[in-house]
Image: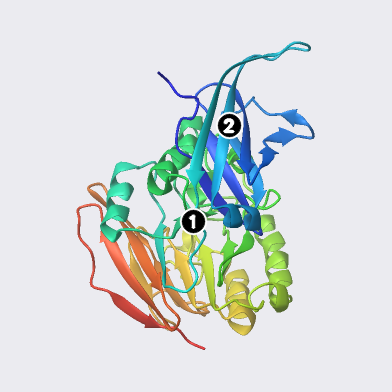
Amino acid sequence: MIYLLKFKPSVFAIGDSYQIYVVASVPAVFSVIVGGRTYYDASNGVLRSSSKIHCVTVPAKELDAAGEYSVLLEEVLSRRIAFSTIGRRELFRFSFSPLPTGRPVRIYHMADTHNGVELPVKAAAVYGSYDLLILNGDIPNHCDEESNIENIYCLTGQLTEGRIPILFSRGNHDMRGKFAEHYCDVTPTCHGKTYYTTRLGNLWFLVLDCGEDKVDGHPEYGGVNCCFSFRREETEFLKAVASHPETEYAAPGVTHRFVICHIPFTFVSENPEWAIERELYTGWANLLKETVRPDLMLCGHLHRSGISPVGGYLDHLGQPCTVIVGADVDKDHWRGAGILVEDDRYTVEFTDSNGAKSAPTVLKKEG
């Protein structure tokens, strides 16, 4: 029997909401039930069935309080002007655990999985249980095939089983291919934007997106990018976040602050093709340092894992805090980063798909 639900759900934290994603195996309509209320994947009253990737947005406080939700998929046999027909119906219930309070929080961070599933899942298992999963860009290898986007939900379905929250950022490879222009229609965004803030418990997160890693006019892109303009729009967003501490990073109860960004933008490559936007990225770093004062910045992109303190090997443009590159990619292995969040410290362990785990690195929380 082929179930309508292709993978287990994925629950992404965006702003003050959760976006629950599923992939259907056939054309279907989708809804989520939380605390007796039904939320629909709909466009102004019309249930969606044209895409097999579905999303429903629910208030975070409602799901946190309920501790469970049900997903309903209904197969669309025919969609007509009148008398459309619905076939099979499948209802699945999932428990859900918001970020804990009163104990340390365990985070697992991954980036640059590039369509891989088996090796990242093995690496995460080495770390053990975790309360939050962070997917930090380049989860598909590219977007030239729609199945690559579905691969995101295959991975998250196995890693979380729909039971814990996920944070999601876009990587530069996610901008490549004929489906890239539709990527943000079927992945988590905040009102269509790939940069946003969210709060989980006493942890506050700023998700940034550098776009591509070379100038828009680079021959590799063939004239289909406008990241120069995109980054300037994002700069205005960042300024707005910085100017509202009382509702963002300094809101009552916030004790830990993180920046999530696929590209470690304070690093300047020796290759001039990748040494772009120095002035803009310096401005980002300075603004974060002067206002948000994040505890950690989590990145990928470099395909080698490591920790760069302020003044370290990634600090060419003024790191606002310690940077953790939590992904290491090789043809035979994949490595991610586990982060234990305590009141006064962070403990980082890199875990490998071959079963290895690094010695713990303890980073003292400043301030």
Task: Please provide percent x and percent y for residue 16.
Answer: 66, 59
Q: Which residue is under mark 1?
A: 97
Q: Residues within 10 Å of mark 1 (few under 14, many from 20)?
A: some
Task: Please provide percent x and percent y for residue 308.
Answer: 39, 76
Say which of 209 and 232 sits in front. Answer: 209
Task: Please provide percent x and percent y for residue 244.
Answer: 73, 75
Q: Quadrant of residue 185?
A: top right
Which sits earlier in the primary sequence, circle 1 or circle 2? Answer: 2
Q: Quadrant of residue 221?
A: top right
Say which of 230 and 333 sits in front. Answer: 333
Q: Which residue is under mark 2?
A: 72
Q: Amino acid at mark 2?
A: Leu
Say which of 329 and 296 sits in front. Answer: 296
Can residue 188 be seen in the rendering of this structure?
A: no
Which element carries disc 1, helix, strand or loop? loop
338 left or right of 277 in image? left
